[in-house]
Amino acid sequence: MDKRSVLRLFEPDARGRWLGARWLFLRALGVFHFSVFYSLAFQIRGLLGDRGILPVSELFQYLREHAGASRFWIVPSLLWIAPSDRGLVALVVVGLVASSLLVLNVAPRACLVVCGVLFVSFVNAAQDFSSYQSEGMLLDATAAAFVLAPRGFRPGLGASQPPSWAARFLLVWECFRIYFESGVAKIASGDPSWRDLTAMDHYYENGPLPTWIGWWAQQLPHGFHAFTALATLVVELGIVFGVFFRRRAVRLATFAVLTTLQIGIIATANYCFLNYLVLALGILIVDDETLERFTGGRLQLPREHDHDAPTSGWRPWAAAAWLSTLFYASLAVFAFAGAPEPMSYLAAPADALARFRLANRYGLFARMTGVRYEIEFQGSLDGVHYVPYRFRYKPQALDEAPKIYAPYQPRFEWNLWFCAIYEENVPPRHRLGVARQTCPWVVRVEMRLLERSPDVLRLFREDPFAGRAPHYVRAVLYQYWMTDRATLRATGRYWRREELGSYVDEAYDP
């Protein structure tokens, strides 16, 4: 293959067979970014604000004192301009505007840049409230979509700027990697629950933020759970290869299977925008002719544009350089991460992009959580009678059905679940020490509640002391189980729980 033939892969595809899929995907990407900034609008000051749990100002001050000029490479973020409440609010407001314009198909390329830069600025400064695989997925998709998107202020379908083969391929490649790498991780982890097909037996009960549909799914017999565990492995390690087939029937069958799997996950668990994004990536294997048939001919998409020389606004060599770097890095992070010298240098591009959360390695549910622990904050005026701070989203009240609220992401409550599962294999007498090592910020929550920080209080459903300051605050660890249908009918309770003791030392106002 000569140089011209290679560059043709990065030029607009004159047949324009993916205009509809591109249009739908970019609108969905705008919705996902909007969900990120919308959820941060209610949380960011409580998480990172001046009176929040982990103030970004404290992190940046520490880096100024100890890292010098290298601090900008250690934590690349626009928040260096204003590491304060005002800066955090500005980031959210601009992100909401840019993501809304992307949904409306206004200047999509510019909006993708703004959304991506703002999101990575938050992620890099969020400390313990980031580092989720979903964030990497969204940033990987945004980086590739910048080349996929048509130029212009109001490009419409962009019929004169059809997507290149390479730009669409990189996003389909991301879709494939999410599934396949997750399947490999399940096998490589050695978790026996995937080998004996018991991985799903308590999945709905022990996941981070279940839904009421997940509660009902938990009631189904082992045979159903074994089937879904096996089906998950078959899809991730086998069926997903169908995204690369040229034959339309194979691609559409693959799309149907992947979509069914994602809808099932969306219905039974709240994983923010993660599964919506994976579902949207699958749209890119559906060509325009199929979309027209699906709409009964009411949607008419051009097969070929009216110009002899389609344009993309990118010079082919520039698109080739960017997309090839992303593709190689995504290969390297899977193949060479952790490799001994002299192989490790092959992952250097991936290491550089990691600063910006690009070219990520995926491995969803490599190990299944065997129990459900929950941390509850409680306050007291006298040190004897304690009342709980009620969460907005996570399981707490025994008679309250789990809710559906994704793609909204309650990062505070999500991270508390991760803090709790660190305790899964720790004997009770050692839990206090583990908590101090793994989630020291839980103590910061206690201190902020003693101070009655309004930003942190807004992370909870209500202030149980109605404006009064508690004198004591503690974090208590519970184990939760879903009830069965008979118990629900008899008591109205979806959960039962057992107190295991203090999670960290009690905080008090001397």
Image: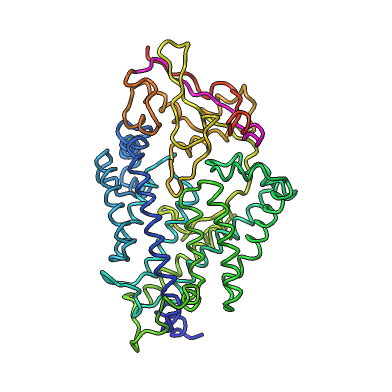
Residue 421 lies, with reference to residue 406, above or below; the image says: above
> Is 164 left, or right, of 427 in this rendering?
left
Q: Quadrant of residue 14?
A: bottom left
User: Farthest front residue?
Assistant: 489
Residue placed most toward the observer, 58 or 101:
101
Q: How is the image coloured?
A: rainbow
Q: Where residue 236 sits in the image (x, y, percent)? A: 63, 60
> Is 86 left, or right, of 187 in this rendering?
left
Q: Where residue 276 sits in the image (x, y, percent)? A: 48, 56
Question: At 39% across and 47% down in the image, what residue appears?
Answer: 123
Q: In which quarter of the image is residue 250?
A: bottom right
Question: At 29% across and 60% down in the image, what residue appears?
Answer: 101
Question: At 39% across and 65% down in the image, what residue appears?
Answer: 26
> Is 88 left, or right, of 277 in this rendering?
left
Q: Quadrant of residue 151?
A: bottom left
Magenta includes 431? Answer: no
Residue placed most toward the observer, 34 or 109:
34
Q: Where residue 376 sits in the image (x, y, percent)? A: 50, 27
Residue placed most toward the observer, 435 or 112:
112
How many circles with numbers are drawn on the protein? 0
Magenta span of residues: 469-488
Residue 393 lies, with reference to residue 499, above or below; the image says: below
Q: Where residue 27 sits in the image (x, y, percent)? A: 38, 63
Task: Tell me the quadrant of the picture where the C terminus can be found.
Answer: top left
> Is 481 left, or right, of 28 in this rendering?
right
